[in-house]
Amino acid sequence: MAARKALEDQGLPDLMVLGIETTCDETSAAVVTRSPSGASDIRSNVIRSQVEIHSPYGGVVPEIAARAHVEVLDHVIAEAMRQANVDYSELSGIAAAAGPGLIGGVIVGLTTAKAIALAAKKPLVAVNHLEAHALTARLTDGVAFPYLLLLVSGGHTQLLAIEDVGKYTRLGTTLDDAVGEAFDKVAKMLSLPYPGGPQVEEQAKHGYSARFAFPRPLMGRREPDFSLSGLKTAVRLEADRLAPLSDEDVADLCASFQAAVVDLIADRVRAGARAFRDRLGRGPTALVVAGGVAANGMIRESLAKVAAELNTRFAMPAPVLCTDNGAMIAWAGAERLARGIRDRLDVSPRARWPLDPAAAASATARA
């Protein structure tokens, strides 16, 4: 906070950052500005999805993803710079997702960012992809610290206390599957197209959510952790019992599964809010949800109600900023640059990179 106050006192100009995202199956680049007071502006945000490439395989193939990033990244960056109407000389820094993610894709993006930073003589910021998700609500909604974050995606399900840039405490996490992973696996067992999450949500709109009494794992537990494996297994067993499945069966299975997920997420967030208060001695300034699963309408509606119960603000970035995108990387880079944080050009890509190393170390010790 002191660094940001120093920026304001000095009357420095806005920071303008190019952000590069290549951790999974979206190739993205964006230009974002941040004023000394924290105001933001997305000048461009170009995203190229690889869904069509991976659809025949029912999931992301790492080698194909990395090759696709190589083929389009230069063009995506050029388009982002063109839409923003800026030259590299005008940038304050270059930010790239340095992990966690599929290591091939991470290498492509980070190496490209290093080359640009070196050629343009600009600072490099190696961004934690999860940190970018964690800070996006400050880009879109100007949320003040400290806030409670529910990060839900295909690979991550965590509840975190976001206390400041670089200061994150994991309050709870999944003990097995991530929420997005469970959605995708249920979609696959029901023979729905890839990507599975949106397909399950669409089917659920036409189904009867009370037909199947699926379990709500860990409901009522004080520790704000998640478990999806048992719920996923219950869906598979019911689907096997009913096979061959009718269209009505598929819709009802999806509706009942989604209803269970919505219930357990709401319960786990309430537990997370209690843990937040126990740790910080106060409630959060907001309940923030980020990650691809945040695009699910029922989950959003449920969490808005939970925020009202907690008497706190509810903030969720637009769906395009919940999935992987360059704007969130650029913003995280700007937040770090505003505090004088930059990285050396020999910084390494990381397939794994927990936001809260202490929590990760503790989990490893218990295992």
Image (cartoon, grey):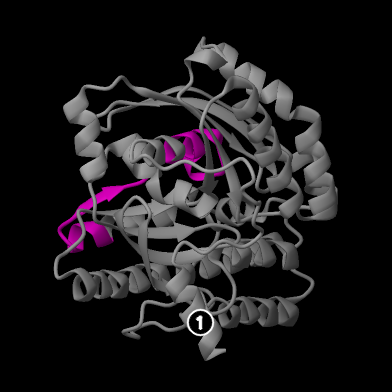
Question: Which segment is the magenta one?
Answer: 306-332
Q: Quadrant of residue 52?
A: top right
Query: Residue 314 at what x, y percent from top left?
Result: 27, 50
Q: Residue at x 68, y 30 (%)?
A: 115
Q: Is residue 61 left or right of residue 333?
A: right
Secondary structure beneath dot 1 equals helix
Q: Residue at x 44, y 26 (%)?
A: 32
Q: Nearer the viewer, residue 159 or 259?
A: 159
Q: Position of residue 230 (x, y in %)?
A: 58, 83
Does residue 41 appear to the left or right of 73 in the view shown? left
Taking depth in this image into account, of 206 and 85 the one nearest to the observer is 85
Q: Residue at x 62, y 33 (%)?
A: 28
Q: Amino acid at mark 1?
A: Ala
Q: Which residue is mark 1?
A: 363
Badge 1: few (under 14), some or many (20 or more) residues near its Cα, within 10 Å? few
Q: For residue 193, say whether it is visible.
A: no
Residue 311 in sight here: yes
Quarter of the rendering containing residue 124: top right
Q: Position of residue 276 (x, y in %)?
A: 25, 69
Image coordinates of residue 144 in percent, x first then y, are 22, 46
Q: Is residue 253 above or below residue 332?
A: below
Task: Note whether 269 is above or below 141 in the view shown.
Answer: below
Is 329 included in the stretch rendered in magenta? yes
Which of 199 and 167 lies nearest the eye of the viewer?
A: 167
| Figure quadrant of the C terminus | bottom right
Query: Does residue 118 show up magenta in the picture?
Result: no
Q: Residue furthest bottom?
A: 366
So how many labels did they put on this image?
A: 1
Height in image: 318 above or below 214? Answer: above
